[in-house]
Amino acid sequence: MFFRSAPIALAALAFVTATAAAQVAEPRFAGEWTLDVGNSSWSAGPLPKGSTWTVKFAADTMKMRREVVTDATTTINEIVVGFDGKPWSNALKLSGAEATMLATAKWDGRILVFSMAGNIMGTAIVQDERWVLSDDGKRVVASRTLTADGEDVGAGSWTYVRK
């Protein structure tokens, strides 16, 4: 009996091993990151004077602390999102107002796709980001788009350097 089922078991094991080997390893975005203003761009206005991201992963969730420094203020937001395909609710300070934003995250190969959507002072906001980690693991480029009530209002590339 064992000898008859052994080829099937070996074939299944080979398939599982090949499938696992073919999957792309998720990049290591965990850590502390500082905005490289000189290598970043934003079409909707000036970039902040500074920004720091602290990113942590636990099981199937990502926790992110985003600090943004402008001429007028420093804003700190804590964001938690899962990789379960469901939107996660986060209370954030954005554009001088508090808003509940629904965040999602997923992997597209080695790219982290991160999105937030919500309503700020009666305006539907959607921010989409695609994070790409450099081969040496020292830089993250977040390509970002922003829409308000379905209209494109900003696009750019934000480069962060690992601390």
Image (spheres, grey):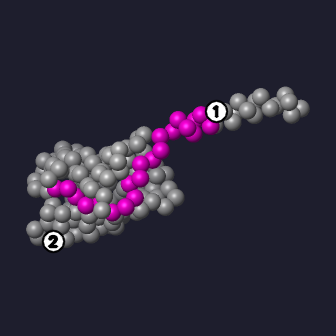
Residue that badge 2 annotates: 73
Q: Is residue 28 left or right of residue 68?
A: right
* Quadrant location of the C terminus in the rendered image: bottom left
Amino acid under disc 2:
Thr
- The answer to which of marks 2 and 1 sits earlier in the sequence is 1
Residue 94 shows in the view? no
Amino acid under disc 1:
Phe
Q: Is residue 154 magenta?
A: no
Residue that badge 1 annotates: 15
Q: Residue furthest bottom?
A: 73
The residue located at (41%, 48%) in the rendering is: 27
The residue located at (16%, 56%) in the rendering is: 37
Residue 55 percent coordinates (x, y)? 37, 61
- Range of the magenta residues? 17-37
Q: Is residue 147 above or below residue 80?
A: above
Q: Which mark is residue 119?
A: none
Alpha carbons under labels 2 and 1: distance apart: 55 Å
Dot 1, how many residues are within 10 Å of its Cα: few (below 14), some (14-19), or many (20+)? few
Residue 156 percent coordinates (x, y)? 19, 47
Q: Is residue 80 left or right of residue 141?
A: right
Residue 74 percent coordinates (x, y)? 19, 71
Locate residue 53: give its quadrant: bottom left
Residue 85 shows in the view? yes
